[in-house]
Image (spheres, rainbow, N blue to C red):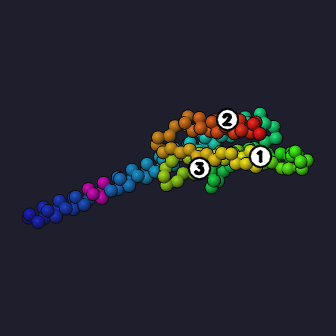
Amino acid sequence: MEFEDQLQKAISRGKERSANRQDSERQKLTTAEELRNRHNDFRLDLSDYIEHGLKKLVHHFPGFAYETIFGERGWGGAIYRDDLARGPDGKAGSFFSRIEITVRPQNEFNVVNITGKGTVKNKEIFSWNFYKDIADSIDEEFKEKIDSWILQYAEQFAAQ
């Protein structure tokens, strides 16, 4: 009878361990799904914010064209323009200017990551990257960073 009791207890412990493992796996899936949903919310909100900010810049600097960015590189936008100008030696030249800001896709590090690049008259002047854990992220931090990047670019472009 003693062996039978031990056998029943071992079976009960095994069932309990299995149930705990299933609960843990279910909880991980829920957490992964919550992280994915939270990242998607950031992506949608921030890509709209990027679009509005860059379009405001277009109004102050005519000649820029807006481009929506989506896919493997991320989601966001860019503005760009080509300028023709004569140098002091009288030769004509073409100068390219562009600012691009994107929200990168979610990765294994579970961070919200925004990137940006700024080029003024064929010279890359900025290459930005800002990220935070999804769980610790708030929209306002990213929006402040996006505003800062757009303002820095506007100042650099106006100075050229």
Q: Quadrant of the C terminus?
A: top right
Mark 2 neighbour class, 10 Å CA radius: few under 14, some 14 to 19, many 20 or more = some
Looking at the rendered structure, the kind of residue marked 3 is Arg
Mark 1 neighbour class, 10 Å CA radius: few under 14, some 14 to 19, many 20 or more = some
Q: Nearer the viewer, residue 71 or 11?
A: 71
Quadrant of the rendered structure where residue 79 is? top right
Q: Residue furthest front?
A: 89
Mark 2, mark 3: which one is toward the viewer?
Answer: 2
Mark 1, mark 2: which one is toward the viewer?
Answer: 1
- The structure residue drawn at horizontal position 59% and vertical position 38%, both measured from the top left corner, is 145
- The structure residue drawn at horizontal position 59% and vertical position 35%, both measured from the top left corner, is 144
**Spatial distance from mark 2 to mark 3, Cα to Cα?**
21 Å
Give the SS element for disc 1.
Answer: loop
Discs 1, 2 touching: Cβ within 8 Å = no
Q: Nearer the viewer, residue 146 or 6?
A: 146
**Of label 1 and label 3, which has the lower sequence position?**
3
Discs 2, 3 touching: Cβ within 8 Å = no
**Of label 2 and label 3, which has the lower sequence position?**
3
Q: Nearer the viewer, residue 18 or 101?
A: 101
Residue 66 at x, y = what percent?
75, 43
Task: Check residue 18 for magenta coloring.
Answer: yes
Looking at the rendered structure, the kind of residue marked 2 is Leu
- The structure residue drawn at horizontal position 78% and vertical position 42%, both measured from the top left corner, is 64
The residue singled out by tag 2 in the image is: 151
Range of the magenta residues? 16-20
**Spatial distance from mark 1 to mark 3, Cα to Cα?**
26 Å
The residue singled out by tag 3 in the image is: 104
The residue singled out by tag 1 in the image is: 121
Q: Quadrant of the N terminus?
A: bottom left
* Left or right: 58 as drawn, with respect to 5: right
